[in-house]
Image (spheres, grey):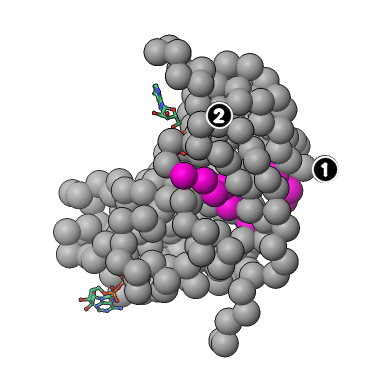
Amino acid sequence: RPLVAIRNVSKQFANGTIAVRDVNLDLAAGEFVSLLGPSGCGKSTLLRMVAGLGDPSVGTIDWMGSAHDAWGRPARELGFVFQDPTLMPWATALDNVVLPLKLAGVNRGEAAARGAEMLALVGLKGFETSYPRELSGGMKMRVSIARALVTHPKILLMDEPFAALDEITRHKLNDDLLRLWEANRFTAVFVTHSVFESVYLSQRIVVMAARPGRVMADLRVGAPYPRDD
Ligand code: ADP
Ligand code: ADP
């Protein structure tokens, strides 16, 4: 049984642009999927609809077996990472990470403990009290990933998260993301226009095409790239 079932989904914006056309996809629990395609092919639009940020014009996106909030949306079961780390500049790394726990009503002590544990998992032990301006681009992205995972969501949605980083930092973050996924086995959906990145990270690559906003291929790519450690 899939975790998320995308059925006959199309999206037309108010200005007439059809960004997504008749997409059918199942997302299985625990898999690492890349959504690959050139700029403008509808990857973000599709990912955002999975997150509940914008409804399909046609079709349905069903979350199987998830609790739903008052608006019928899956409650706290997903984390979202944007290309921009979108941290609050006035808050420390730890305060940024624990925000979703505070919103969920988790008490301060437990939130701080879980936040510190998440920061350690993304390699930022010792940076709890640092402010975003004191961190490098890669470190800010790590904070953003920690914030997305701190609620232990079933699914982590990432929209070109490393596109603005230099190649070496990007490579390190790819490895660290794989390590996190191997340890926790959330479902990962990773939007990218990099063929290399999609092959390196994923077990499955869903290829979207430029003009029509359609899924052109759904490829199995085997085990993640073997690494030394
Ligand atoms: P990708 O993530 O693959 O770059 P997007 O999903 O961002 O593609 O965009 C797909 C198409 O939809 C593009 O032509 C884009 O210009 C258009 N688009 C995206 N968001 C909107 C919007 N809010 N209103 C109108 N058109 C949009
Ligand atoms: P990242 O890959 O997380 O962006 P980088 O290796 O690119 O980290 O480092 C960017 C800057 O941040 C460097 O100047 C480095 O000194 C600093 N930095 C990164 N990680 C640490 C760390 N664990 N301790 C101290 N400084 C760090």
- Badge 2 crowding class, 10 Å Cα cut-off, few under 14, some 14 to 19, many 20 or more, is some
Question: Which residue occupies 36% across, 49% down?
Answer: 83
Up the image or down, 79 lies above or below 164; here it is above
Q: What amino acid is at disc 1?
A: Arg
Q: Are marks 1 and 2 in contact (CB under 8 Å)?
A: no
Q: Is residue 136 magenta?
A: no
View quadrant of ligand 2: bottom left
Out of 83 and 207, give the one closest to the viewer. Answer: 207
Q: Is residue 33 magenta?
A: yes
Please tell me whether mark 1 sits on a helix, a strand or a loop: loop
Residue picked out by circle 2: 212
Residue pushed farthest front?
Answer: 211
Up the image or down, 145 lies above or below 11; here it is below
- Badge 1 crowding class, 10 Å Cα cut-off, few under 14, some 14 to 19, many 20 or more, is few
Question: Which residue occupies 38% across, 62% down?
Answer: 142
Expressed as whole percent of the image width and height from the top left, the position of residue 167 reads 35, 69
Q: Picture quarter containing residue 170?
A: bottom left
Question: Which residue occupies 82% across, 43% down?
Answer: 1
Residue at disc 1, CB closer than 8 Å to ligand 1? no
Q: What amino acid is at disc 2?
A: Pro
How far apart in space, not on screen, are marks 1 and 2 (Cα)?
A: 29 Å
Expressed as whole percent of the image width and height from the top left, the position of residue 88 reads 25, 46
**Residue 163 in sight here:** yes
Out of 133 and 33, give the one closest to the viewer. Answer: 33
Q: Which residues are magenta?
A: 27-38
Left or right? Give the position of 86 relative to 204. left
Left or right? Give the position of 185 relative to 86. right
Residue picked out by circle 1: 1
Expressed as whole percent of the image width and height from the top left, the position of residue 42 reads 50, 34
Left or right? Give the position of 130 relative to 27. left
**Residue 69 in sight here:** no
